[in-house]
Image: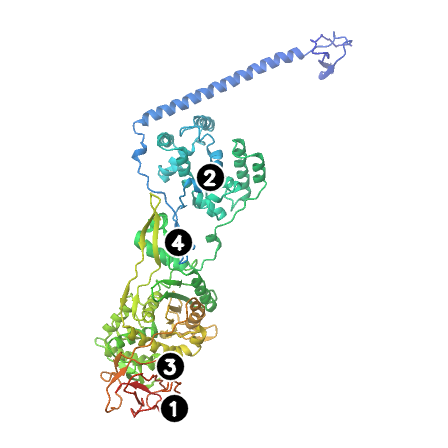
Amino acid sequence: MMGIKARSPPSRGSVQQRVVYLRSAGILYPGVYNNRSVDYDGITRVGRRRRRRQKRNSGSLGAFLGIVAAAAGLACIAFFASFAYTYARVAENLPQVGEYNVGPLAQTSIVYDADGNVVDELHGGQNRFVVPMEEISPYLRDAVVAIEDHRFYEHRGLDFEAIARAARENITSMSIREGGSTITQQLIKNTFIDPEYRSIPSFQRKITEASLAWQYEKTHTKEEILEQYLNTVFFGANAYGAEAAARTYFDKSASELTLREAALLAGIINLPGAYDPFTDPESAKKRRDVVLDRMLEYGYITREEHDRAVSSGLGLNRGRLEQQDNDNEYFLNAVQRELAAEFGNEMVYEGGLHIYTTLDSELQQMASEAVSSVVNPEAGDPSAALVSIESETGAVRAMVGGSDFEEVKFNLATQGQRQAGSAFKPFVLAEAIDQGISPETMYVSRDLSIDIRGQAEPYEVSNYGNVQRGPIDLEEAMAQSDNTVFVQLAQDLGMRNVVEMAHRLGIESELDPYLSTALGGLRVGVTPLEMASAYSTFANRGEHMKPFLVTKVTRIGEDGREEVLLEHEPEGERVLSEDEAATVTEVLRAVVERGTASRFHNLDAALGRPAAGKTGTTDRFVDAWFVGYVPQLTTSVWVGYPQSSRPMINVRGYQQINGENFPLDIWAAYMSRAVQKYPYAEFEEPSDTLNLEVKRDGRAYSRPERSGRGDVASGGRRQASASPGGGQQQASSSPGGGDVVYYYRPPQQSPPPIYYHPGTGQQFQQPQPGVRYRIIRP
């Protein structure tokens, strides 16, 4: 072949492979020949040249790799030399573990209702529940070790292999990207290093961590270290520690975690923000599967367990407290404020307290539903507040402080001091009875113009609608909410005495001794909690029990035993005698039976038992109240606009909102259900031994003289009138005294009662048909 020169290549096996380049028109074409008969004189073999070239190339690559290896070695030497130099410089000042006084870990406090159910968890920056190792799933222990520090059980706090690996990465990147931190070092960082320095890369900080970790391992077992780590490490979503993480992501305890759940939690530790399963489930699942791979690699699980877990979903389940539409936020808000004042915020939110409250979750739900069934602030309605107190103990069972806690944090039930209006009048009556004045005492209902010392203008008093009822007794004045009668009564009693009585009954807000206070016109105002507390004194037969929200506060001490920090002790004060309180209740029963509370409601029928209470409405319909009770439970309801003195007029077709509609609607809706939790009970009646004077002096109305009898009224006043034969006495309006109902019940002992006409004073031995009567002793 012209122009081709061939040389014989060395044989390789039975097949001689030859590579030739065919020169043709200056282009080289590679070819492969396996034929021995070819003339090789014209073929130039290039295999040897390639081998020489490969040798030269491999020699160059080897030299390059050698240089890189030498450089890396020198770099490592330089790093360790730098590390050693830095260590030597700071060694004299390295801290000792014993120098650190690490306080207890911040732990979440748990709030329970009266039945022991968890209703809230209180925590500051760290949501944490410290639990022992035996209460943490073995799957989670193994998963964390596998992904975070697989040589945990082999090293002494420092993993030098990991440190070398991290050093190479950091040198290559010319930055501190990896730290080679062991679980022990992470624990030291989370507990010993100031939080503001934990995230700042620093060789000195690393040396400090390493030194402390080395010392720490000398005095603590691996199990102790792992337990502490699992109680401190951050799992995202404000969950610190295994127990909080298990509750946050799966609504279960750490001891109940399955393999797939444990792997998910372990995967979150490295980058909680990136692997948040709630916001990025896909990334979280990929990371979980990496953890499962490591667990399989290091022998913690079998292939079958691995594959089954990898093929499963995440199985997330937000905790109950996150899911539920809480209707008890205002109650819990009051609890938090009370405990913060007692223990401080740090203890409340980080002390791991167990807080047992008086909250009845069932009654709370009833209260919230009653409020929302009547008012809807989002539609322009006024707001409402409700407080329900167990009269005999003072335990607050339900509280609604507004319509939307997320929008308005201000608690109207405990912080909203508002004008009480006529709901204050029972306190004036209580003072009158305490001074020995009978509710049968009469005043003339008429417009008043009272000169006040130091004021240029007189104090003008009139009734709603400018009604003037003429001579009327205190019971009927209460039933009809007569302003002018109670101002005259307050003048006779002395306003300082009235104010003192209100405070003794349960009002804690500042009260001024002004006549306007007798009608609930207050400078500071009162809260629904105070009003319920004060009325509960009447329900509790004259003994005031200080209201309370918390029954007990405990925590687990260092020895693992429960430590009681606070335990409620009942605080009772006798304000009225039982007979006096029963007399107040009789008068307030008249409000329910035939007074202002009876115009739109039959409360006795709605509740299926007797009730007592008082409506209240302030000037211009700014505030409206109903406060009432049965023997076991006292409830106050306030309605109004919380942030202004806005009149409640033309609301959803109502010309005005007063104590007789919205507040009473809410009270009836709640109490008609709430009382079903308590046995049927009637109010106690005043005994015959209670002697109250029918007042004639001062501003009281003086009836015509009745010869041959005293001026003392017996305590034998009853809720319903009974004839001597035991039947009901039907009565008509009394001449000259207004439309007043008078009750009586014949005594069982001699002498027999004497009856008299309330208008003329005419006396009878037997009741006359069609006439209303009082009962008095001869």
Q: Position of residue 711 (x, y in %)?
A: 24, 85
First in sequence: mark 2 vs mark 4 = 4
- Residue 745 position in % (x across, y down): 34, 83
Q: Amino acid at mark 3?
A: Ala
Residue 240's image quarter? top left
Q: Quadrant of residue 722?
A: bottom left
Check whether the beta carbons of the residues at disc 4 and disc 3 lie within 8 A of each other.
no
For the N terminus, which image quadrant?
top right
Relative to 504, residue 136 above or below = above
The one nearer the camera, 691 or 341, is: 691
Amino acid on which the number 2 mark rests in the picture: Ile
Quarter of the rendering containing residue 242: top left
Residue assigned mark 1: 770
Of residues 518 and 326, the one nearer the viewer is 326
Q: Are marks 1 and 2 in contact (CB under 8 Å)?
A: no
Q: Position of residue 128 (x, y in %)?
A: 41, 45
Mark 2: few/some/many CA within 10 Å (<14, 14-19, 20+):
some
Q: Nearer the N terminus, badge 1 or badge 2?
A: 2
Q: Which residue is mark 3?
A: 720
What residue appears at the point 42 percent right and 34 percent down from the top-left corner? 183
Q: Which residue is mark 2?
A: 269
